[in-house]
Image (cartoon, rainbow, N blue to C red):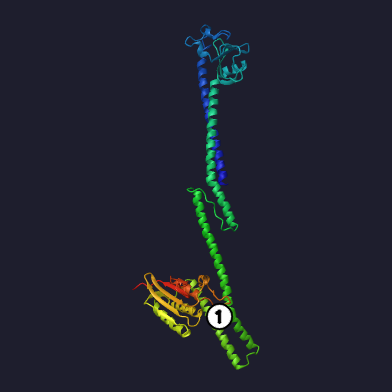
Amino acid sequence: MTLKTRMLVAMAVVAGLLVAASWTVTSLTASYLLHQVDAQLVRFTSGPGGPGKPLPPPVAVAPDSADAQGLPPEQDAGSFSAVYVGVVENGVVRTRLSPAQSAAGNPVPLIDAAEATRLAREGSKETVDSTAGGTRYRVAARVAAGGEVVVTGLPLDDVDATVRQLVTTEVIATAAVLVVLGLILWWVLRLGVRPVRRMTEAAATIAAGDLSHRVPEEAPGTEAHELGVALNTMLERIEASFAERAAIEARLRRFVADASHELRTPVTTVRGYAELYRLGGLTDGDALDAAMARTESETVRMGRLVEDLLTLARLDEGQRGDVVAVELDRVVDDAVADLRVRHADHPVTVRTEPAVVLGDPDRLHQVVANLLTNAAVHTPAGTPVEVDVIRQSAGVRLVVRDHGPGMDDEAVAQAFERFWRADESRSRASGGSGLGLSIVAAIVSSLGGKVRLERPGDGPGTVAVVDLPAAEPT
């Protein structure tokens, strides 16, 4: 059952309770007023025609001469202006005292002799209609001293008028209460149920695949507004998570494709030489030696690529290696010495300060070596390379700058992506497999540092900046 249905049912229950309460009050009031009328009938039955007292004459005699008609001396004629007195004579109830001034056209109770006799025998009271149709009477009967059956009645005009007024008041009050409750119900549904319905529709739209859809904002300061804000925040995070997952899946597919591409060439080379040997195409000793050399070279490249992939996988798993205090300036000196041997055509300028960082010495050496190799491979021969190690208040900064042609903004933004190379042809003449800077970024991130590429403002070239946290002094 929906909230709206439950509230409507509650409204119906309240209306039923109000009607039941009104009916109960009306019934009790009518019963109380009838009891009062019955008490008056008991008092009046001791009046005209009571034991030892004569009956009033027929109503043809004016009520002004009531004293002469045998009324009790302690009551005047006006006291009985609303009392009816009748006597059963010859099987007919004849009026002796009428509530009005004359008998002509006066409403009198509709009661026959048999019914009057029964009331006198049972000593009960009964409500009957009158000859006028609109007036009702409360009547009682008794046996007078002379044996006559005397009927006494009081009109219920005042009782009926009071009950009608009470019913009118109850109807108006009940209607007013229901109107107020209806307005409150409408207000609650407008502020509570309608926002929930709109949120349900929004959730259905989102479930259909539109993750950019949002819950409509409601009036500030309401629970619906707070719920909507919370749902929209959650939806933004879910959308971001899905986008991130999609990006990760895209990178994974690209990574697998790139790795397959990188491995395909050496595998194809090794397989080709193997098939050539199997088919007898390498009968010459020099040709066989050249084929084995090429096979060895390709397997070395394959091994280097697999090792790089394994390094990235371990770093992705959070493996930091043996973290110890490392003198970064000495690591730089060693890496520069290696570069001067491999790339003697690139002059290197080194400016270092004693600096100690926390990390794995081998991986820190790999960071510096990859940055230096990247600077040497992607610049023409004779291009100067500068290396700086700078101590700062927040840590240690390593700066590697080359004075080559530099990189555009797109290349700077994508340089740390795995298997990315500026050379669209993916030729190894322009460098390695495209994992060098990716490994640098992964190692630096695992040590709590940051790395970025910049274009220098004072000339061409590329600047790689690595910030690492300094080791705390012991």
2 vs 350, left or right, is right
Quarter holding residue 93: top right
Find residue 18 and report its horizontal and vertical position in percent. 53, 34
Residue at the limit of the structure toward the left, as seen here: 474
* Residue at 54% across, 15% down: 83
Find residue 340 and report its horizontal and vertical position in percent. 45, 84
Find residue 338 and report its horizontal and vertical position in percent. 45, 83
Quarter holding residue 294: bottom right
* Front residue (pair 406, 135): 406
Find residue 358 and report its horizontal and vertical position in percent. 40, 74
Helix or strand or loop: what does disc 1 sit on?
Answer: helix
311 vs 395, left or right, is right
The local crowd at label 1, few if under 14, some if 14 to 19, many if 20 or more residues have their Cα within 10 Å, is few
Quarter placement of the C terminus: bottom left
Residue at the limit of the structure toward the bottom, as seen here: 285
Q: Mark 1 belongs to which amino acid?
A: Arg
* Front residue (pair 153, 201): 201
* Front residue (pair 430, 158): 430
Q: Is residue 65 above or below residue 431?
A: above
* Residue at 58% across, 73% down: 257
Q: Is residue 23 visible?
A: no
Residue at the limit of the structure toward the top, as seen here: 68
Q: Is residue 334 above or below residue 394?
A: below
Q: Is residue 166 visible?
A: yes
Q: Which residue is mark 1?
A: 428
Residue at the limit of the structure toward the front, as seen here: 458
